[in-house]
């Protein structure tokens, strides 16, 4: 390698400082502070996603549910809320839904659809009905009219019960037999001299007389039995007369009160049918109201205002509101954001209470879920959260497919409950579900869940960035001004906005784009506002924005600083000067959360004669990922098709990332690995003050990679810590030049000639810069010029092939000599 001068000569492909950071000109924004700008409502650059949300919100057909995908911090949630609220305001208010008792099958309560605003009215009407009847029915049964009729019935049935027995007693007395009443019932006994015969007197009678008495007693006993046999039937008639009396009395007041409630809901067929069932049940169970009266104790308040509807026995007449809207006058559909989408929170649940050690429930313990509250409108869920909740995703799909809400507890689904539960009638479902999640999750659902594509036919894909232009810069400035007002921050000067837009370009990794991750920009604004407050400034300046960006990077740079310290102290071996054969500084990016930084790595290659085998040590020890392995295989293809085409590939080469103790993936170091191989084959040293990034294809073209800014800055920081010489720099693919948005200190070092950023298009260009030796091209005869690097490589490979051939011939001769001997 030729000796370098103290003042380094310009290298081919050096990028001028002006192209390393294309900053926004504050003068082109056209304002002094953001106070001069009009607010900008809504998002910019998201026309595609907004169109999908608008379609899902407005289309009337089923299954056009929506998945909103994009990077966090894009404003997905706020955009969805704004757009859905706009459409919800144009839609009619949905119906109210309540559960009421099924008097025929209490374990299967009825679901009733009511006009918006009617549920609360019906509930209060039923409560008032119970309270009124709990006072009026007991009073009615205490009235003189009821008592007179009750006494008449009692007297009638008393006489009907006593008259046959009295007649029988007279007949028995006529035959000298007495009818005696005992605690065990009636008993017949013979009479002599007006007194029942005692047992000892009976035994003293002669046998004939005893026989006559026994015959008489037996005959009268059969007659008495015949009379008493009619007693149960008489009791049944007695009870029926009392029940009819009670029902008749209760019907008078119940029908009046229920009729009053029915008048308030005239024309509502389902409510009138329910009230009729209530009327019949109240008449049949009037004793419930009498029991409450008898159990009530004196308290500080009069009975007239006692809340009888709160008593457990009157739950049968309660109205359990699942969803209620204040009024149908203000037309609007609900927009519900459910932040905890468990199965119970989505579809509702059935609660229980413990009584005497037993779990019991009724329809009043049915609780609504998010689907009930959002019915008739929109339900917004986080995709990742619902997929991590047991049975929640399955429950949501089942409801969407059946278009009804069926309440099933998690315990029932898992078979953990043996308690008798309810079977509430399903409630018809008509709503639009919006899932917000990541792109990879959307792809997984499409691949792994065949029902997902049928239920979620639309996707709103949020853009990560937008084209950079004078117009878009002004739009971004308006968005910044709007956020500053909403967050109640200080106004920003034009210079501060320009610096913030520079950060937006940096986050986009493209000088032709602005990032649309507005959340990250808002965080910078909030922190800059804090620093402006500490400095007692009324307006945020460029320095405040720059400090916020710098401090955020510093807080996240502990690991980066420790790695840099290890390099400076030579714990991790990275050379930034001198030249070494088969050794190149590669660059990679390490990401920790949202913070990314570049890390140099020493890549070494060793070669010898072999059978054409390339050993990727990272892959062999299972530290290399598939993309890295692909890059190494491309290197082998490049060598085998570029050099010594007329002889077998007789190379054994090994590649390794030195001091790499974690996984390696990606092909961004493949050009660096190829440079190391070419250096090792040509025995020409590589200058260590230059680092390399970029992938390579089989044609030897250097291709674009990601994280180019972080990679350049990572090597710059190492060189700066060791002292910048002006000969250090980084080789990047030419296609990455438009992605450069380097830190100001890196740009300043390039401007001062202390650091270089060099673009390359092909491997030949790069190896010439790294070694200072001409690569060389084949002439018309297909031969590389003598003394060029490619000629050295080809000669080395030919020599390996010839040596391998001679070795093979020698081994074959020895084998034949052994056989003949």
Image: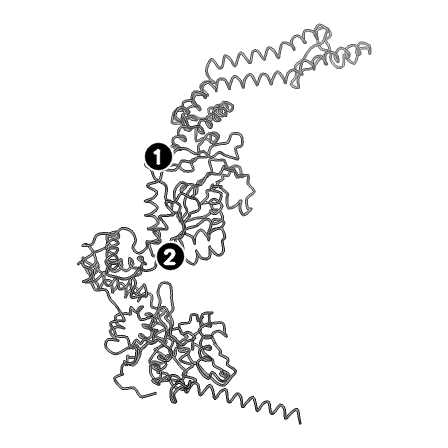
Horizontal side of 488 relative to 397 (left or right) equals left
Furthest-front residue in this view:
780
Element carrying mark 1? loop
Q: Position of residue 57 (x, y in %)?
A: 37, 46
Q: Position of residue 314 (x, y in %)?
A: 47, 29
Horizontal side of 3 relative to 402 (left or right) equals left
Q: Which residue is mark 1?
A: 328
Q: Which residue is mark 2?
A: 70
Horizontal side of 42 relative to 178 (left or right) equals left
Q: Position of residue 190 (x, y in %)?
A: 73, 10
- Compared with residue 271, is residue 60 higher up or lower down, i.e. above or below? below
Q: Which quadrant of the figure has residue 661?
A: bottom left
- Compared with residue 357, is residue 629 higher up or lower down, i.e. above or below? below
**Residue at image location 44% in from the left, 32% down from the top:** 319
Element carrying mark 2? loop
Q: Of label 1 and label 2, which has the lower sequence position?
A: 2
Give neighbour class at mark 2: few <14, some 14-19, many 20+ (Cα, 10 Å).
many
**Who is closer to the viewer here, 436 or 344?**
436
Furthest-left residue in this view:
32
Q: Which mark is residue 83?
A: none
């Amino acid at each position: 390698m030729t000796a370098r001068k103290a003042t380094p000569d310009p290298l081919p492909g050096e990028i001028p400082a002006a192209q390393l950071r294309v900053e926004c000109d504050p003068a082109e924004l056209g304002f002094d502070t953001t106070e001069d700008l009009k607010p900008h409502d809504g998002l910019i650059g998201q026309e595609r996603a907004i169109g999908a949300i608008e379609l899902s919100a407005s289309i009337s057909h089923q299954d056009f549910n929506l998945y909103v995908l994009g990077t966090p911090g894009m404003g997905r949630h706020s955009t969805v809320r704004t757009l859905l609220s706009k459409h919800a305001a144009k839609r009619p208010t949905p119906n109210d839904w309540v559960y009421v008792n099924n008097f025929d099958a209490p374990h299967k309560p009825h679901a009733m659809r009511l006009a918006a605003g009617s549920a609360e009215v019906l509930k209060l009407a039923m409560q008032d009905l119970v309270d009124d009847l709990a006072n009026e029915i007991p009073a009615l049964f205490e009235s003189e009219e009821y008592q007179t009729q009750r006494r008449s019935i009692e007297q009638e049935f008393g006489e009907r019960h006593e008259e046959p027995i009295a007649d029988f007693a007279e007949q028995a007395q006529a035959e000298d037999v007495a009818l005696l009443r005992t605690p065990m019932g009636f008993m017949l006994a013979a009479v002599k001299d007006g007194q029942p015969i005692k047992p000892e007197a009976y035994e003293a009678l002669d046998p004939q007389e005893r026989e006559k008495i026994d015959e008489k007693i037996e005959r009268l006993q059969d007659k008495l039995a015949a009379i008493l046999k009619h007693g149960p039937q008489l009791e049944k008639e007695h009870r029926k007369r009392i029940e009819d009396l009670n029902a008749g009395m209760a019907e008078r007041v119940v029908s009046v009160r229920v009729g009053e409630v029915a008048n308030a809901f005239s024309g509502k067929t389902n409510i009138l049918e329910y009230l009729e069932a209530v009327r019949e049940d109240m008449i049949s169970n009037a004793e419930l109201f009498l029991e409450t009266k008898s159990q009530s104790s004196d308290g500080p308040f009069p009975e007239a205002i006692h809340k009888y509807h709160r008593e457990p026995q009157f739950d049968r007449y309660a109205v359990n509101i699942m969803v209620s809207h204040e009024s149908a006058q203000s037309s609007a559909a609900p927009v519900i954001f459910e932040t905890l989408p468990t199965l119970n929170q989505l579809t509702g649940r059935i609660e229980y209470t413990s009584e005497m050690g037993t779990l019991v429930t009724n329809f009043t313990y049915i609780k609504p879920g998010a689907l009930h509250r959002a019915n008739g409108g929109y339900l917004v869920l986080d995709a990742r959260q619902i997929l991590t909740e047991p049975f929640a995703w399955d429950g949501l799909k089942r409801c969407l497919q059946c278009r009804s809400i069926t309440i099933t507890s998690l315990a029932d689904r898992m078979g953990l409950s043996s308690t008798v539960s309810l079977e509430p009638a399903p409630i018809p479902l008509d709503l639009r579900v919006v899932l917000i999640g990541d792109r990879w999750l959307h792809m997984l659902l499409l691949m792994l869940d065949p029902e997902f594509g049928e239920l979620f036919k639309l996707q709103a894909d949020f853009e990560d960035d937008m084209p950079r232009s004078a117009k878009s810069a002004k739009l971004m400035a308006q968005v910044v001004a709007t956020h500053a007002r909403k967050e109640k921050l200080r106004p920003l000067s034009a210079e501060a906005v320009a610096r913030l837009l520079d950060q937006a370009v940096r986050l986009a990794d493209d000088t032709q784009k602005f990032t649309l991750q507005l959340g990250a920009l808002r965080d910078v604004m909030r922190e800059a506002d804090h620093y402006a407050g500490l400095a007692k400034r009324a307006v945020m300046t460029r320095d405040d924005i720059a400090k916020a960006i710098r401090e955020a990077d510093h807080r996240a740079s502990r690991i980066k600083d420790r790695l840099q310290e290890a390099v400076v102290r030579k714990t991790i071996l990275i050379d930034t000067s001198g030249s070494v054969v088969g050794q190149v500084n590669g660059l990679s990016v390490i990401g920790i959360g949202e913070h990314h930084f570049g890390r140099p790595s020493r890549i070494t290659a060793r070669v010898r004669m072999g059978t054409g085998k390339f050993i990727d040590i990272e892959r062999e020890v299972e530290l290399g990922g598939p993309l890295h392995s692909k890059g190494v295989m491309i290197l082998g293809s490049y060598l085998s098709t570029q050099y010594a085409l007329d002889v077998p590939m007789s190379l054994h080469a090994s590649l390794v990332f030195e001091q790499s103790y974690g996984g390696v993936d990606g092909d961004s170091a493949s050009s660096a690995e190829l440079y190391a191989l070419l250096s090792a084959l040509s025995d020409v040293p590589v200058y260590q003050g230059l680092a390399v990034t970029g992938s390579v294809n089989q044609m030897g073209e250097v291709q674009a990679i990601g994280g180019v800014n972080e990679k350049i800055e990572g090597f710059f920081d190492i060189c700066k810590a060791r002292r910048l010489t002006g000969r250090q720099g980084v080789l990047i693919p030419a296609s990455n030049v438009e992605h450069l948005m380097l830190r100001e200190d890196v740009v300043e070092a390039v401007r001062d000639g202390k650091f270089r950023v060099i673009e390359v298009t092909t491997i030949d260009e790069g190896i010439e810069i790294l070694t200072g030796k001409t690569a060389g091209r084949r002439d018309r005869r297909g031969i590389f010029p003598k003394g060029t690097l490619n000629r050295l490589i080809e000669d080395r490979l030919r020599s390996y092939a010839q040596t391998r051939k001679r070795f093979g011939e020698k081994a074959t001769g020895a084998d034949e000599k052994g056989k003949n001997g």
